[in-house]
Image (cartoon, helix red, strand yellow):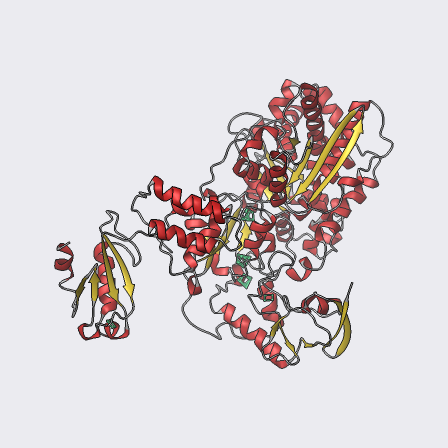
Amino acid sequence: MRRFSSVPFSGTQEQEQQLTSWLEQHKDMPGAAMPALQKAQEIYGYLPIEVQRMVAEGLGKPLAEIYGISTFYSQFSLCPKGAYKISVCLGTACYVKGSGKIYEKLQEMLNITGGECTADGKFSLDACRCIGACGLAPVMTINDDVYGRLTGDELEEILSRY
Amino acid sequence: MEMVNLKINNIPCQAPAGSTILEAAHAAGIEIPTLCYLKEINEIGACRICVVEVKGARALATACVYPVAEGMEVFTNTPKVQAARKTNLELVLSTHNQDCLACARSGDCELQRLCREYGVDKTNAFEGEMPERSVDDSAAHMTRDNSKCILCRRCVAACAKNQGVGVINALERGFETHIGCAFEAPLAESTCISCGQCIVVCPTGALHEKDDTGKVWDALNDPRKHVIVQTAPSVRATLGECFGLPIGANVEGKMVAALRRLGFDGVFDTDFAADMTIMEEANEFLHRVKEGGVLPMITSCSPGWVKYCETFHPDFIPNLSSCKSPQQMFGALSKTYYAEKMGLDPAEIFCVSIMPCTAKKFEVGREDQSAAGEGVPDVDVALTTRELASMIRRAGLRFADLPDEAFDPAMGEASGAGHIFGATGGVMEAALRTAVETLTGESLAKLDFTEVRGTEGVKEATYEAAGLTVRVCVVSGTANAGKVLDAVRAGEKQYDFIEVMACPGGCVNGGGQPTQPASVRNFVDLKALRAKALYDEDAGMGLRKSHENPLVKKVYAEYLGEPGSEKAHHILHTSYVVRERQF
Ligand code: SF4
Ligand code: SF4
Ligand code: SF4
Ligand code: FES
Ligand code: FES
């Protein structure tokens, strides 16, 4: 069962304005829900309940339908990204070298599941496909920094740098 | 109508252009199994149980959505078709919690029946991971057990399209797909109006009402309790279906006999309270008209509708009649008038209602429904028609062999107007019979207001009486109600009196009524057949107007005074709340 972001919502007036005017213009278009959610994610970066409510209201659709779409397509994220985005490669080379374990350990350390963000908004965690650094497997990135040949023991120390 | 010629299993036949293979086969006497398909509301071709061979087509075709064509040759029963259907069932079973022995729908489950019909002989043809079991039993009226769900989405369609609520949906994707509310909210915190329309369309045991029969057995076995029962108008028109009688059989007499044998101390008729409702409602309506009160007045008998109004159209709360529903009026009178008459302490009386409706389970727990005082609810337990059937079975009563018996007189006498409350248009017709005679002071020459009869979702009529024009509208299915309210709000429609029943077709098609498989629902007009039983009963009666019911007159003369009196208000009227729309 999915867990939800505990990061407080911090949308601005301008963002809301932007979204509601888009919804106003497109509300009668058939199949508007999908592009509406794309637009909303473009504006807010993710789709928390507050934003999904705006979309549902704006299109005159039930929230359950909007939520159903937002959880069907993997392009949509219900959690914000952290200030530091951790991404663990689960591509074949990395996986064979144990990146699955690294991913699990990070979930434990940060007390979140993959796709989520810590409550203080600092770290978010995602899995990704091969990033072309197989020679360094297993690999993770934190924003633009790349860490390779991970064993798991150094994770504590790496996170403490941020 | 343009017809096309085709052959089904080598037999030539004709079907209207644009119809589906499923419909053409049905007309030709061949049943093709369906799981996801529900006519008009769920034509998604998802489950593939209905596959057939079409000559010249490469793949098997889904008969529920595949249109017929001139010269088409269809085969519904080839080895390939049988094998495909069986495999599809085995795939469903691979993620299904198969505890049929302890399942609410065992015996009338569509999945179980198809497995038997298609010779599924292994329950584990495909083994693998099972989805996590999640059960939502937060709501007062129903339970959802996703481990029994086959993801046909019939519930989603009924909730969104017929009811205009759309509180449930398929969430996530692939192996994780499941039915739930937005953000996994529990049903009790959602905008669910408790109508139970999702339950009656569910083919499996995934959705079922909260089983409250245990509370009733306990009360029946408690010597300190005086246990009485009331049966809603429409239950007599449907209960027989649970015992193999034809759809539309009126089993009032056997139902009464069964209840007596279950041990109830009084077996009464909600229809009497329906007559009381008409007295209060007609009075309230005429009062509103004369005093310039809020119009249109809208009926309040259907708790699913009331919850819908409170949740989605709170600006119309002042339009709702303040009358309690017949169920609650009955309960309130049982713990006041009847208690006094019988010399009983209201707290000793245990009032059970047999209802076509799951929202009635929600209604018994509403605020402002305790005429005899705090802590003494008007009605203690509301059971559905299905739950009554299960009690009758457990008690070992051979229903079809029971004699016909009559309700107990203390609160058992009802008019034909009370009986027709169970069908869309019935409350309006009953109210008109009384309101028009009250206005004109004359006897109506013709009692049938046929304009408001029939199963259409929205009906309109205009009547004149004593110089007054009354524009009425009759609506069933809350999606239709939403549209009518939007039109009234926008000033596009003007009415004086609106009847709304939450379920399409009214109580005869309520969420607590016997389930019928899709093979019946898709091809038989359940609503019309069941309603006919009620209109036939009304037509055959001498007493057809609520205000002529001697029992009603007696209750006013001995206890309440006039309709709309202060005492009547205290006991028979209620209030409403604005509901949050969180999920
Ligand atoms: S839903 Fe049907 S098949 Fe599944 S356990 Fe219940 S009775 Fe058996
Ligand atoms: S009870 Fe009615 S409103 Fe609630 S989920 Fe079922 S169909 Fe929807
Ligand atoms: S709950 Fe019932 S009706 Fe809804 S998708 Fe599951 S099996 Fe179908
Ligand atoms: S598999 Fe991880 S970088 Fe290629
Ligand atoms: S695909 Fe035809 S009934 Fe489901």
Q: Is residue B137 visible?
A: no
**In this rendering, would B250 be left or right of B151?**
right
Q: Nearer the viewer, residue A52 or A12?
A: A12
Residue at 48% of width from left, 73% of height from top? B124
Q: Quadrant of ligand 4?
A: bottom left
Nearer to us in this view, B490 or B524: B490
Q: Is residue A104 above or below residue A58?
A: below
Left or right of residue B78, residue B435 in this image: right
Q: Position of residue A67 (x, y in %)?
A: 44, 52
Count of numbered circles in the view: 0
- Pinpoint residue B135: horizontal percent, then vertical percent: 45, 53
Q: Quadrant of the C terminus of chain B?
A: top left
In the rendered structure, the answer to whether residue B483 lies left or right of residue A39 reads right
* Residue B140 rendering spot, x and y as whole percentages: 51, 43
Q: Which one is in front, B175 or B511?
A: B175
Identify the image quadrant of residue B464. Answer: top right
Q: Is residue B73 above or below residue A22?
A: below
- Relative to A123, say whether B126 is above or below: below
| In the image, residue B462 above or below residue A157 | above
Residue A84 visible in this rendered orientation of the protein: yes
Viewer-nearest residue: B356 or B579:
B579
Residue at point 35%, 41% (across, down):
A14
Q: Residue at x 56, y 41 (%)?
A: B361
x and y percent of residue A134 in the render? 22, 74
The residue sitting at 25% across, 69% down in the picture is: A131
